[in-house]
Amino acid sequence: MNASTRLTRYLIEKKIAYQAIEHFQSNSSIGTAITANISLKQIAKAVLLKNHEDKKLMAILPATDKISLSVLNDKLHGSFELMKERELYQFFSDCHHGAIPPAPGAYNLTMICEKKLDLLSRVYLEAGDHHTLLCVTQDDFKTLMTSGKHLNFSNEVFH
């Protein structure tokens, strides 16, 4: 397993139990769900945003969904936009490109979590490579997501 060292250290520090699920290499959430035989709705993905003041925000939402920046900005009274991919590399230097773990605390980022994820009994997280998911219980997921707001800000695009 080549999971993010920052992520695994953080999970150990917070006493969050997880099960590592190895799968064939995949560069997309859909591919990961297929190769790992897991529902796409149970995979949490991270989207990195920033505002005009360069404030960073990690938005965490189901892999089935697409973020609605207009809804998110209305609810936060903000002006967030997607970060450029090259900007992400400095935060996630221990991860493969495009494999961002949805664990804001491990990377000292503020966060917002899509409420739909609060309804799942188990949540699967990208581990920082393209070969591993980490499965956590809802209680442990809530522990990971305590530092931010839980709102509805995304729309399902994959069924």
Image: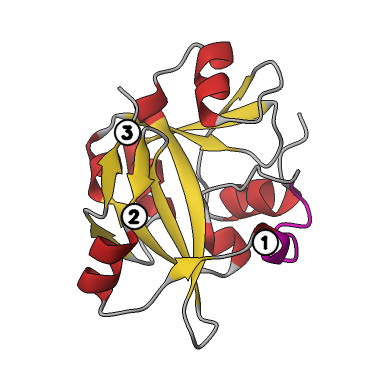
Give the residue at x 41% y 51%: 60
**What residue type is disc 3 on?**
Val
Q: Write down the region rendered in magenta.
A: 86-95
Q: Which residue is mark 2?
A: 113
The alpha-carbon separation of the residues under discs 3 and 1 comes to 24 Å
| Residue 113 percent location from the top left of the image | 34, 55
**Quarter containing the N terminus:** top right
Residue at horizontal 69 percent and vertical 16 percent from the top? 24
> Which residue is under mark 3?
157
Q: Which is more N-terminal, label 2 or label 3?
A: 2
Nearer the observer, disc 2 or disc 1? 1
From the image, tell me which residue sits under label 1: 88
- Give the distance between the C-alpha atoms of the residues marked 3 and 2, in whole angstroms: 17 Å
> SS at mark 2?
strand
Residue at screen point 50% across, 88% down: 53
> Principal SS element in the magenta part?
loop
Q: CA distance from mark 2 to mark 1?
A: 19 Å
- The amino acid beneath tag 1 is Leu
Q: Position of residue 101 (x, y in %)?
A: 58, 47
Q: Which mark is residue 25?
A: none
Q: Is residue 14 above or below residue 51?
A: above
